[in-house]
Every structure is written in structure tokens, then in C-alpha cells.
Image (cartoon, rainbow, N blue to C red):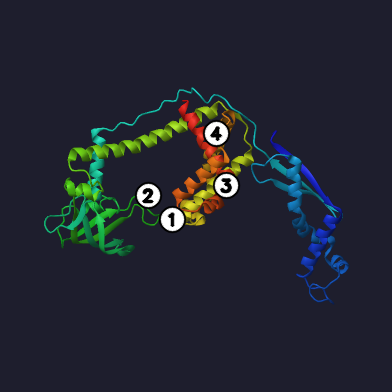
Amino acid sequence: MKNVLEIEITTKGEKWSNALDKAYKKKNKEVKIEGFRKGMAPKNIFINKFGIESLYMDAVDYVLDEAYKDALKKAKETPVIEPTVDIVAISEKEVTFKFKIITKPEVTLGDYKGLKVKKETAKVSKEEIDDEIAKLKNQLAEIVPKTKGVVEKGNTAVIDFDGYVDGKALDGGKGENYPLEIGSNTFIPGFEEGLIGTHIGEEKELNLKFPDNYVENLKGKDVLFKVTVKEIKERVIPEVNEEFYKDLGFENIKTEEEFRKEVENVIKERKQADLDDAFIEDCLSKASESMKVEINEEIIDEEVHRMIHQFEEQLSMQGIKLDDYAKITGMTHEKLHEQMEPEAIKRVKYRYLLEAIAEAEKIDFTKKEVEEKTKEMADNYGISVDELLKAYGSDEVVKYDMKMHRALEILKENN
């Protein structure tokens, strides 16, 4: 591919000789040679015992950074991913590195204006408003003891239970004061339904069968549960009034009509955000389809690794390690890589698309504009400008983000 450069750099003479000397001094301190204190064996004695080859890899560490810089100078282009390096030859006199440098692929921008992407406007039905209000009422519902009546669907039955399989107590099949919401499908089929109609203090035997997709040693087996209903609780749905509005944070709403209008606005805003996201995705998708770019496999791999790292950070915020997640789900690193690859390809394409639009539209920002944006972002995050720049790496990254946002706005405005 045109954007792949293979550059050889040879380090020899005094530079390589000095690197070998440093490697000898380092290694000499780590080994014991008979007749000498640790680190005091002369170089010729050390080499006679271990061979000059034993110094090569440590010596490479001392010269690799400078060789890498020389390769970048020779390339005269900025790599888009970390270059790889191989040692093609090594001896007492010199070492030759081959750097594989992948630069940005050539992008031919296609149509990105007048794509006739349909932008939907959110509409909210009466049923959606009713459903949302029902959800809000359920959120504020109180769970109170039910002193009369029997267990009904939607009630919470506080129960003691013992399970028996083949006449023996079921391991893990015992519970005390367990709050079970009837209809939650927490227990095996028939358990919750079997409690409907029972009174407080009533004991009931449930003869059930474990599902065929249950754990290996229990699936399809008969099981007896002895259950005692100790307490019944029910949800008390609040009335829709001014107190209800205030509990939801709507201080200025007085009437049901005003409340329904506010709920409608909330739903509409949420739906419109989803529609706007879908519009942006359609614009990016159509514009990238007409764009020509050949993306290296290594660039895709780099993006996948970045996504896996982000996923790992998300899991850690939930107190889950990636290795534990893999054990629970059976998701190997290879499977995760394969699963994320289509999204990675899409992300890379969209990035190159927006960069190409920014270039075509000659999008740029002055130093002052970048400083103002940096200050605005820092204020929004509640941190100092220095802290934000440290997180971003430099103001050039802020400027790059500004260009990408402006390119996206141009794409949206012209379709």
C-alpha cells in the first residue's frame, strides 16, 4: 500500500560500540564470574564466558530511540499508528533496524452535500404520554403492608421457603424473610403464580419442575417448595396532583394539562435526540460510501484495541475486571476483537471523512479561538485550562476536535 514505508536504519561505529559498553556494564553487575567480585570482571573475560551476543539486546535498547527518530526524519511523514520494528542484521560492528511506518491513507472525498438524507421530526402520541405518566407514578409509588386480602400479581410477598429434590433439602433452596415481587419471574415457573390467593400466615406446598434449560444437575427434575407467607406488601400509586408534580421537580406546574404538556416536551426532546443521532449516522454513512479510502489492517487493529481499552475502563467503573467478564460471558479476547471490528472500521472511515471535509472546506481556527474554546471546555468540566490540556495532550488536539465538529456541522447543514 502507498502509505506503508519500510525504512532501514543502521547504527554502527562509536554509537554501537558505546551501546555495547553500556550493555556490558549493566550485565556484568548481574552475573558472578569466578575469581571476580560482582561487576568487576573485565570485558574480555565477560565476553569469553558469555559471548558478545549476550550484549546485543541490551545494546539495542540504548540505540533504538535515536534510530526511530532517524527513521521518522527519513520518512518525512507522520505515522498514524505506532511503527513496528525488526532487527534485520546485528553484529559486533553494527545493527540494522527495519521500521514499518504507516501514514495516513490517501482519501478521495466523494459526495458529501445534497445527499438527500431524510431528517425526521419527533411526534408524541397520547398513548406515549399516558405510558410515561404511568412510569412516573410507579416510580413514586409507596410499598406499604397489606393488612387485608390475599397475594395478588404486583404484590410483594415476604416469604420463608424450603426446597426439596428427591426428598432431600435442595442446596441453596432455602430462604427466610425473602421479598418476592409476584410477576417478576424471579423464581422458576409456577412458583410466583402458586402464591397468588394465599393469606398472611398461610403455608403452601408447591410441586413444581425445574425448566429444561436449568443447571445440569437440576434441569427437568421435580421439586417441592414449602412456603410460608409472612407478610404481603402492595404498591400504592400516588394521585396526580400538585404534590405529585412537586415530587417530580415540576415546581411551577399547577394543572394536569400543564403536566401532560411538560411530559410531552420531555418525551419529544428525548425522541428528537435519538432522531438527530440517526440523521447524523445516515449522513456519515452515505458520505463515507462515496468516499474512496483503503484502510490498513493495522489501523483497524489499533482502533479495536482502543475500543477494548475503553470497554475495560467502563467495566472497571462497575468494579468488574475484563478477565472476570470474559470468564462469565465466555467472551475471549479474539471474539471481542472480532465483535468490535465492524464498529472500528466505521469509526476510522468517519474520522477520515470528516478530516477530508475539513480540508476541502479549508476549516481552520485562530490561536485565540482555540484558547477561548479550551477555556470554555475547562469551565464546563470544572477544571483548570492546564488540567484540561494535560488530559488532551495539547491545544492541537483541541483544535483538531474543533475542526471535526465544524466538518460535521457542514455535513449536517448541507443534507
Q: What residue type is labelled 4?
A: Leu
Up the image or down, 306 lies above or below 218; here it is: above
Q: Where is residue 386 in the image (x, y as percent from the top left)?
A: 54, 53
State yes or no: discs 3 and 4 in contact (Cβ < 8 Å): no
Q: Which numbered disc, 2 or 1, marks the residue closer to the eye?
A: 1
Residue 114 shown left or right of residue 236 in the figure: right
Of the two numbered discs 3 and 1 on the same chain, state the one appearing first in sequence. 3
Q: Residue at left 51%, top 34%?
A: 406
Give the number of the disc on residue 152.
Answer: none
Residue that label 4 marks: 354
State yes or no: discs 2 and 4 in contact (Cβ < 8 Å): no
Q: Position of residue 197 (x, y in %)?
A: 15, 53
Residue 34 shown left or right of residue 389 in the figure: right
Q: Residue at left 30%, top 31%?
A: 123
Q: What residue type is labelled 3?
A: His
Q: Which residue lies furthest to the front in this view?
A: 368
Asked if residue 283 can be seen in this view, the reply is no
Residue that label 1 marks: 318
Q: Position of residue 154 (x, y in %)?
A: 21, 50
Of the two numbered discs 2 and 1 on the same chain, state the one appearing first in sequence. 2
Q: Which amino acid does label 2 sit on?
A: Asn
Location of the N terminus (image quadrant): top right
Q: Which numbered disc, 3 or 4, marks the residue closer to the eye?
A: 4
Give the secondary structure at mark 1.
Answer: loop
Give the secondary structure at mark 3.
Answer: helix
Q: Residue at left 26%, top 32%?
A: 125
Q: Which numbered disc, 2 or 4, marks the residue closer to the eye?
A: 4
Give the secondary structure at mark 2.
Answer: loop
Give the number of the disc on residue 213.
Answer: 2
State yes or no: discs 2 and 1 in contact (Cβ < 8 Å): no
Q: Residue at left 25%, top 51%?
A: 190
Residue that label 3 marks: 305
